[in-house]
Image (cartoon, rainbow, N blue to C red):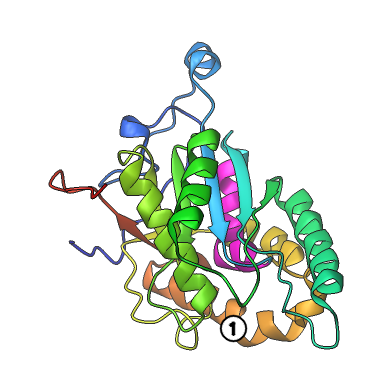
Amino acid sequence: MYMNRRKMIKITGAALAGAALLNNTAIAQDNSAEKSYNAKKKKALIIGAHPDDPETACGGTMVLLREAGYDVVSVYMTRGEAGIVGKTHDEAAAIRTQEAENACKILGARAIFMTQLDGSSEVNKERYVEMRTLIKDEAPDIVFTHWPIDSHPDHRVCSLLVYDAWRRLGYSFELFYFEVMSGTQTQLFQPTDYVDISKVAQIKKDACYCHESQDMHHLYKDWHDGMEHFRGLECRCERAEAFIHLRYTGNDIIES
């Protein structure tokens, strides 16, 4: 895959060629009111393993997509049941579910919670079907999820389940991988595409700070703030989020 480290994704409210979010240059904004009215509303799914993964990985992009007229859906594979020291799974799930819903309100996204268990997520036939069914029912134009090379097993599981759904649903949506805490969690991440989030960075930060149970004030300062600045330096803007765009090559065999 050709890596253009300065390719910028330009998000628009117009219908996009090939249902993609980007092309090799910038996609021009179509200001035709009639065309926008008649066009099918686009949908983006951001699928993370835990509450706070979608927000920290691509919260800025979520805001820009929503502003461009997309239906933005934040999907959580688990409810973060094992993520609060001293709390039972049920207690932690209730707290982290509310935090995710609060964050989604700020981002203008709709929240969906799946049924896997934090720290005990599975890759099996039933889980493949669960993920594929959710994505098929939502019928997205674009999906963002975890990069599969990651230190957290739940992140790896989430990535593999989404990848399998992409293949078995006939590559019917654009697939982008996001990064989380690169270097300690996400590994070997070489972006193909960037989104300039400079103008919406504060909205993203406010959404991330909803996750109070995760000590987000320190986590954001120690990791996410620096990552946004670093990716911005790579593509010559103040702050950016980075992605790897996985493209269908047209040569594949899907096993039954």
Residue 119 pos. (x, y %): 61, 78
Provide residue 36's location: percent of width, then percent of height.
51, 19
Quadrant of the rendering where the N terminus is positioned = bottom left
Q: Is residue 211 found left or right of 221 in the rendered image?
A: right
Label 1 sits on what residue type?
A: Trp
Specify start and end residues of the magenta stretch as a single range.
52-65
Q: Residue at x 55, y 66 (%)?
A: 57
Circle 1 packing at 10 Å, graded few (<14), some (14-19), many (20+), is some
Q: In terms of depth relative to the viewer, which is nearer, 91 or 5?
A: 91
Residue depicted at x 65% and y 72%? 118
Most foreground residue, 97 or 114: 114
The location of residue 144, given as percent across then percent down, is 47, 54
Can residue 26 be seen?
A: no
Q: Residue 27 vs residue 44: left or right? A: left
Q: Position of residue 2 (x, y in %)?
A: 18, 61
In the displayed structure image, the side of residue 152 where residue 20 appears, left or right: left
Can you tell which quarter of the image residue 26 is in? Answer: top left
Q: Which secondary structure class fits the magenta region best?
A: helix
Residue under label 1, please give it. Answer: 223
Q: Is residue 42 above or below residue 255?
A: above
Image height of 246 relative to 168, above or below = below
Q: Is residue 231 magenta?
A: no
Residue visible at 31% across and 32% down in the picture: 18
Residue 49: quadrant of the picture: bottom right
| Residue 56 colored in magenta in the image | yes
Q: Is residue 213 visible?
A: yes
Residue at image x 24%, y 63%?
Answer: 4
Number of numbered callouts drawn: 1
**Towards the viewer: 132 or 176:** 132
Q: Secondary structure under badge 1?
A: helix
